[in-house]
C-alpha cells in the first residue's frame, strides 16, 4: 500500500511540474502584422484603403497621412479636437470614371462620430453604409468604428452605395473603451428628433463649425465639456436643443448661471448673440440643468413646448461593464492553479480508493482463511523444538 501511494504521489508531482514548465515556457512568436495609419496602439491586418475594390483600381498606392492639416487644411483644428491621428488618401479609376477617397482615423468611436456629424450638413439624406452615412450629389460620407470615409465620385450611379458598403466591410472595428459612443447622446429626447441634424462637439472649432447655438467661449470646452445640438420638429415650430456635459455637477452649476445670465441680457449680451440665437423667439429661450448636463432650447416653438422638451432631459448615472480579454495573464494563472488543484484532488482520491481496494481485499482474504482482518492481532512465537 505504501509503494502504491508513493507511485501516485510521484505521478501527481510530475504532472504539476509539466504544467509549471508549460506555464513558464515563452510564448511562440506571432506572425508580424501590418501596421497602418490609425490609432497608435492598434495593429490592423489590412490598410484602411485597398489597392482595388468593386472594380475600382487605385491610380497609385494609397498614401498614408499623419498630419490632419494634409487631410483637410480648412478644418484641421476641428479634426484635432476630435482626436484625428491621420488617415489615408487614394484616387481610383474605373474606365473613364474617377473616385477620390479620404479615410480619417480617430482615437476612438466618439471622435469618429463627432467628425462625421461635423461634416454632415442638415438636410443631407440618410444612406445605409457602415454605422451611419449620408450623401450630397456626388459626395458620400460615412463612418464605421473609429474611421470616417469621405468619397467623391465623378459620376454617382445606382451601384455607388453598394460599392461603398464593400469598402466599409473591411474597415477596422475598435475594442474596449475605444468603442464606446458619446454618453451625452443618450440624454437626447427621441420624440420629434431629426437624427440627421445631430452634431457632437469636443472643442470650440467643432462646435462653431457644426452649427453651435452659443458662443464657443461660453460653453466651457477648456473645462473638458462636450456638447451636442439637435433639431426637433415640434407642433408650433422647429426647435434646437443644446446639451452640454461637464465633468462634475458643480462645474455644470457654475456654467448654467453664466449661460442663463447671457440669455437674459438679450441684445445687450457680450459677446453678441450668434445668428441661431438672433433668429430664435426670445420668449422660447430657456436654460435648465440636470446633474452635470446643462440644456438650452432655442428656435421658434412656443414657450410651453420648449419647456416640455427641456423637461425630458434627465441625467441618470449608469455603470458600463467593459468586456475583458479572455486570454489575459490573470485568467491564465487562475486556470493553471485550478489545473494543479484538480490534479492533486484526483491523485489523492485515487490513493484513497487504492488504499481501500487493496487493504480491504487483503482483509477479506484473511477473514476467508479464518484469520483476523489485520495481522496486528496475530501473536507469533519462536519455537525451538527442544524435544528433538
Image (cartoon, rainbow, N blue to C red):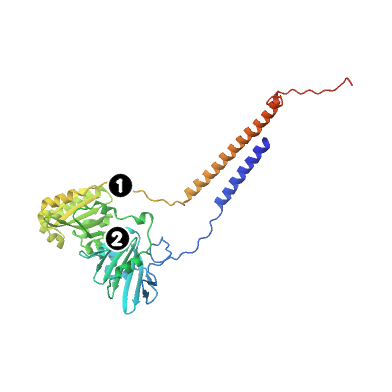
Disc 2 to disc 1, C-alpha distance:
21 Å
Q: Which residue is at the front of the view, 246 or 201?
A: 201
Image coords of residue 49 (percent x, y): 37, 69
Residue linked to disc 2: 113
From the image, tell me which residue sits under label 1.
318
Is residue 278 shown to the viewer in this render?
A: yes
Using the image as rendered, state which of residue 142 and residue 358 is in the foreground.
Answer: 358
Query: SS at mark 2?
Result: helix
Question: Which of the 4 quarters of the picture holds residue 194?
Answer: bottom left
Q: Position of residue 221 (x, y in %)?
A: 26, 57
Looking at the image, is 24 positioned above or below residue 71?
above
Q: Nearer the viewer, residue 243 or 335?
A: 335
* Residue at left offset 54%, top offset 42%: 342
Can you give x and y, in whole percent of width and height, for residue 148 in the image? Answer: 32, 64
Q: Locate the C terminus by quadrant.
A: top right
Indicate left or right for 231 with 367 as reference.
Answer: left
Q: In the rendered view, tell whether residue 383 sits above or below residue 22.
A: above
Q: Residues within 10 Å of mark 1 (few under 14, many from 20)?
A: few
Q: Are marks 2 and 1 in contact (CB under 8 Å)?
A: no
Q: Position of residue 287 (x, y in %)?
A: 16, 51
Q: Residue at x 41, y 51 (%)?
A: 324
Secondary structure of the residue carrying numbered label 1: loop
Amino acid at each position: 500500500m505504501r509503494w502504491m501511494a508513493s507511485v501516485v504521489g510521484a505521478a501527481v508531482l510530475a504532472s504539476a511540474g509539466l504544467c509549471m514548465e508549460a506555464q513558464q515556457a515563452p510564448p511562440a512568436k506571432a506572425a508580424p502584422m501590418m501596421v497602418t495609419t490609425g490609432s497608435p496602439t492598434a495593429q490592423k491586418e489590412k490598410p484602411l484603403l485597398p489597392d482595388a475594390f468593386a472594380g475600382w483600381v487605385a491610380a497609385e498606392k494609397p498614401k498614408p497621412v499623419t498630419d490632419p492639416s494634409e487631410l483637410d487644411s480648412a478644418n484641421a483644428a476641428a479634426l484635432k479636437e476630435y482626436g484625428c491621428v491621420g488617415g489615408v488618401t487614394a484616387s481610383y479609376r474605373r474606365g473613364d470614371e474617377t473616385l477620390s477617397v479620404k479615410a480619417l482615423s480617430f482615437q476612438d468611436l466618439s471622435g469618429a462620430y463627432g467628425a462625421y456629424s461635423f461634416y454632415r450638413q442638415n438636410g443631407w439624406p440618410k444612406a445605409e453604409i457602415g454605422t451611419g452615412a449620408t450623401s450630397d450629389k456626388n459626395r458620400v460620407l460615412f463612418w464605421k468604428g473609429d474611421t470616417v470615409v469621405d468619397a467623391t465620385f465623378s459620376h454617382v450611379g445606382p451601384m455607388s452605395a453598394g460599392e461603398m458598403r464593400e469598402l466599409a466591410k473591411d474597415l477596422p472595428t475598435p475594442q474596449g473603451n475605444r468603442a464606446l459612443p458619446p454618453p451625452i447622446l443618450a440624454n437626447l429626447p427621441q420624440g420629434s428628433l431629426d437624427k440627421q441634424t445631430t452634431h457632437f462637439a469636443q472643442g470650440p472649432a467643432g462646435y462653431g463649425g457644426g452649427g453651435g447655438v452659443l458662443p464657443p467661449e461660453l460653453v466651457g470646452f477648456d473645462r473638458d465639456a462636450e456638447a451636442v445640438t439637435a433639431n426637433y420638429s415640434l407642433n408650433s415650430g422647429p426647435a434646437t436643443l443644446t446639451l452640454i456635459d461637464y465633468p462634475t455637477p458643480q462645474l455644470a452649476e457654475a456654467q448654467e448661471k453664466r449661460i442663463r445670465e447671457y440669455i437674459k441680457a438679450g441684445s445687450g449680451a457680450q459677446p453678441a448673440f450668434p445668428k441661431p440665437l438672433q433668429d430664435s423667439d426670445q420668449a422660447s429661450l430657456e436654460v435648465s440643468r440636470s446633474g452635470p448636463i446643462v440644456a438650452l432650447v432655442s428656435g421658434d416653438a412656443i414657450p410651453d413646448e420648449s419647456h416640455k422638451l427641456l423637461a425630458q432631459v434627465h441625467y441618470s448615472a449608469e455603470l458600463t461593464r467593459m468586456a475583458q480579454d479572455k486570454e489575459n495573464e490573470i485568467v491564465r494563472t487562475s486556470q493553471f492553479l485550478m489545473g494543479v488543484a484538480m490534479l492533486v484532488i484526483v491523485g489523492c482520491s485515487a490513493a484513497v480508493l487504492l488504499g481501500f481496494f487493496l487493504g480491504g481485499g487483503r482483509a477479506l482474504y484473511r477473514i476467508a482463511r479464518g484469520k483476523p482482518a489485520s495481522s496486528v492481532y496475530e501473536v507469533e512465537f519462536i519455537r525451538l523444538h527442544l524435544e528433538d
